[in-house]
């Protein structure tokens, strides 16, 4: 008879699902850890669970909450302690992710980031900064997942086309085969681009978890008024990876984006342009 793994042994005692809460997940997880490590790991993960909320359902765990915890820890602890604590919490989140107890499409464990120390070459001063992946709005992330599904289906269909074309004759002079291979290469390149963009992406959960509540942030929908000619422009501020001016999505790295980040409704900002400095009044902003 095959020996049960630690997880299987725990499952026979406790039933854990995505509708279980954080404290139940902690009790479940601790029993999968080697006894010699349990006391320390339980204390560290318990601090994370308390911070997030013991009664929060696993299915409701959001990336911004995990990111906020990272910033809180790194701001109050030494770097070596931070690395150790975040590594323990990341194991816990990885356990939940791998067992599909939290939303796997949000890549939640990747949002637990530590500070890295950068040295200014001129001053030799050390500056702490967060390692960050691309910031994507939730709607953009879902769109990318849909595109990825379609591309993977196309890849499978093209593999069949290539197999059929190769069976038709001389592969050296086989136009259908070459066309299918070329199409497959383009599809694979698109898949790679999307996967690289999504890997480690920070999902912006509009409004509720913003560190700048009431302020304009990535994901905020904004309306501004040109103070000279009174023209009105409405758009959403997004990470540069998903900027699409034709669909009213401007990059946070653009002149206007930089000017309005962190600002609030009613404020007037100055934006440098080839024709001179322009002033815009923020007439509305919404994170919904």
Image (cartoon, helix red, strand yellow):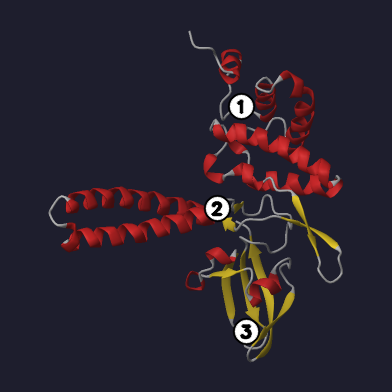
Farthest residue toward the left? Answer: 169
Label 3 to label 2, Cα distance in Å? 32 Å
Closer to the N terminus: mark 3 or mark 2?
Answer: 2
Residue count near mark 3 (Cα–Cα under 10 Å), binned few <14, some 14–19, many ≥20: few
Residue occupying the point 51% across, 73% down: 245
Residue occupying the point 81% across, 67% down: 120
Q: In which quarter of the image is the C terminus?
A: bottom right
The relative height of residue 178 versus residue 42 in the rendered view (above or below) is below
The relative height of residue 246 versus residue 169 in the rendered view (above or below) is below
Q: Could one spot residue 6 in this view of the protein?
A: yes
Q: Where is residue 129 in the image (x, y as percent from the top left)?
A: 76, 58
Tag nearer the camera, 1 or 3: 1
Q: Could you say which disc has been placed on residue 154 in the image?
A: none
Q: Would residue 95 be found to the left or right of residue 180 on screen?
A: right
Quick one: 179 or 45, which is closer to the camera?
A: 179
Quick one: 258 or 119, which is closer to the camera?
A: 119
Tell me the element at label 2.
helix
Residue at mark 3: 230
Label 1 to label 3, Cα distance in Å? 53 Å
Tell me the element at label 3.
loop
Residue at mark 1: 20
Farthest residue toward the bottom? Answer: 275
Residue count near mark 1 (Cα–Cα under 10 Å), binned few <14, some 14–19, many ≥20: some
Residue occupying the point 83% across, 49% down: 75
Closer to the N terminus: mark 1 or mark 2?
Answer: 1
Tell me the element at label 1.
loop
The relative height of residue 273 versus residue 211 in the rendered view (above or below) is below
Q: Where is residue 97 in the image (x, y as percent from the top left)?
A: 57, 35
Residue at mark 2: 138
Quick one: 93 or 162, which is closer to the camera?
A: 162
């Amino acid at each position: 008879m095959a020996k049960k793994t630690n997880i299987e042994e725990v499952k026979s005692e406790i039933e854990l699902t995505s509708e279980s809460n954080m404290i139940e997940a902690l009790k479940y997880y601790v029993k999968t850890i080697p006894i010699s490590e349990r006391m320390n790991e339980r204390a560290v993960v318990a601090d994370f669970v308390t911070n997030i909320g013991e009664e929060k359902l696993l299915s409701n765990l959001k990336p911004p909450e995990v990111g906020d915890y990272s910033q809180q820890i790194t701001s109050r602890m030494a770097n070596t302690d931070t690395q150790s604590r975040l590594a323990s919490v990341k194991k816990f989140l990885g356990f939940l992710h791998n067992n599909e107890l939290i939303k796997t499409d949000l890549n939640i464990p990747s949002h637990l980031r530590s500070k890295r120390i950068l040295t200014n070459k001129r001053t030799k001063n050390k500056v702490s900064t967060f390692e960050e992946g691309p910031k994507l709005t939730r709607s953009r992330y879902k769109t990318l997942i849909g595109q990825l599904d379609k591309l993977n289906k196309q890849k499978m269909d093209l593999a069949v086309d290539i197999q059929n074309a190769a069976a038709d004759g001389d592969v050296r002079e086989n136009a259908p085969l070459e066309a299918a291979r070329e199409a497959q290469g383009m599809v694979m390149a698109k898949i790679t681009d999307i996967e690289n963009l999504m890997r480690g992406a920070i999902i912006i959960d509009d409004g509720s978890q913003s560190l700048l509540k009431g302020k304009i942030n990535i994901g905020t929908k904004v309306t501004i008024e040109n103070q000279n000619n009174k023209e009105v422009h409405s758009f959403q501020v997004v990470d540069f990876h998903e900027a699409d001016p034709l669909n009213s999505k401007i990059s946070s790295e653009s002149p206007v984006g930089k000017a309005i980040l962190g600002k609030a409704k009613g404020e007037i900002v100055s934006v440098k342009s080839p024709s001179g400095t322009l002033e815009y009044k923020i007439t509305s902003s919404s994170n919904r």
